[in-house]
Image: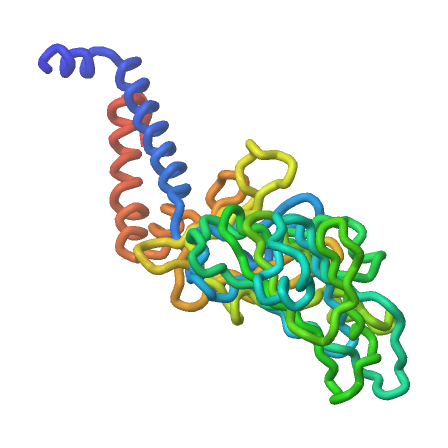
Amino acid sequence: MTSLKEHWRGSLLFRRVTAACLFILAAALVYFGSRIPRSVLLPADDLNTKCVARVGESQMILLKPNVGEGDLALSYVGNKNEIADIWLENATLDDRSQRLLFPNSGTKAASAISYTTGGSASREKSDDTCHTTIEIRRAKGSAPLDTLKLYQSDATAGPQRFRQVVLDAGKTAMEIEVHTDSPTPGAIDLPGCHKLLTVGGNQPVDLPPIPVQMIVPSGKIDVHFNPSDPALPIWTGKEQTFEAVSLGDGTLRGKGLEIVSMGKTQAPPELDVRAAGSGDGITFSRIKLGSEMMQLEIGRDPEKAKAYADGTSLYNYDLVAAIQKNPILSFAFAVVLVPALWKWVKKNCFPDMTD
């Protein structure tokens, strides 16, 4: 210790190097102290603006969504001029629908199933459209949901005048009930009323107006929404979005949300939002389906979350701003610490300087 003091007194270079190191250390502390991730209060408009999955390029992943057995994961209630079709890559009919529609066939293995619109319709009785209702629920007895993926796969959704949502629940089985009903009693020849059910390689079945239940043990659930009259699009607003699809029965809660590239599996998430603290998660609501994007709204007051984009925190503690906002700290730095530090530097590092 004595030799260090003597070295300090006897070496001007040592004092200057030490002072420079202290300044570098202080600058590093300010730099890293202003980049400590902080949680943000939800909902946040700028965060919702970033919550976009581009068609064919990225997908949304809801982490640990709180969907119990029999609870809705996604739902849709049809409206005038809206026609909905479903494609399943790996599904079966439930026992009731199997016995009703295929009474002479045994239980079959999972296969591709489609529920689509076919045939022509007359507009003589009404200018309305048959309304299709879709309910997608977590199957009873199924494993809890680890992730729920949402995306759109067709980059030409805009020119082809439809909107699309693809749901993938991974290895958690999902139950689907779909039915198409006329808004006018007895009117069965309206646009969208004629539905075809295709199971595997079999011929399409012309469906009567009854509900159909299907089970998806794994794989994609692909739903398209089209206008029955191309002259009257189903989307609205300057962003041309379709907003008739709901997560759950209006909202879903989960531990977080990721938006990831569909092509770069090793890249960090484009957006990563995680629930902060010991709360029970984040609320997700209001799906918007556009021709080039899908968007969600994140959070309900007073939820908090931490958010990252491409691996970098979006919201940080700003040490300098915190000091500037505190009158006591501002006074201490401006009037006491900075002058005292400058006086110390002149005395020890530049002894020949004069005031």
Residue shown at 40% from the left, 63% from the top: 303
Give whichever of 215, 104 is nearer the camera: 104
In this rendering, does residue 342 appear at all? yes
The N terminus lies in quadrant: top left
- The quarter in which the C terminus is drawn is top left
Above or below 56: residue 345? above
Q: Residue furthest left?
A: 2
Q: Nearer the viewer, residue 230 or 102?
A: 102
When asked about the image quadrant of residue 162, the answer is bottom right
Residue at x 60%, y 65% (from the top left corner):
213
- Residue 89 in the image: x percent, y percent? 67, 49
Colour mapping: rainbow
Instruction: Please identify the quarter of the rendering in which residue 286 is found.
Output: bottom right
**Residue most extreme to the front:** 104
Q: Is residue 55 left or right of residue 48?
A: right
Q: Residue at x 57, y 57 (%)?
A: 215
- Pick whichever, 3 or 131, lies toward us: 131
Total of numbered circles in the picture? Answer: 0
Residue 154 vertical placement versus 223 (above, below): above
Residue 352 in the image: x percent, y percent?
Answer: 30, 21
57 relative to 159, above or below:
above
Residue at x 36% of width, y 46% of height: 319
Residue 309 or 115: which is nearer the viewer? 115
Is residue 44 visible from the viewing direction of this image?
A: no
> Where residue 265 appears, x then y in whole percent?
58, 34
Question: What percent of the width, then of the height, locates residue 290?
Answer: 71, 60
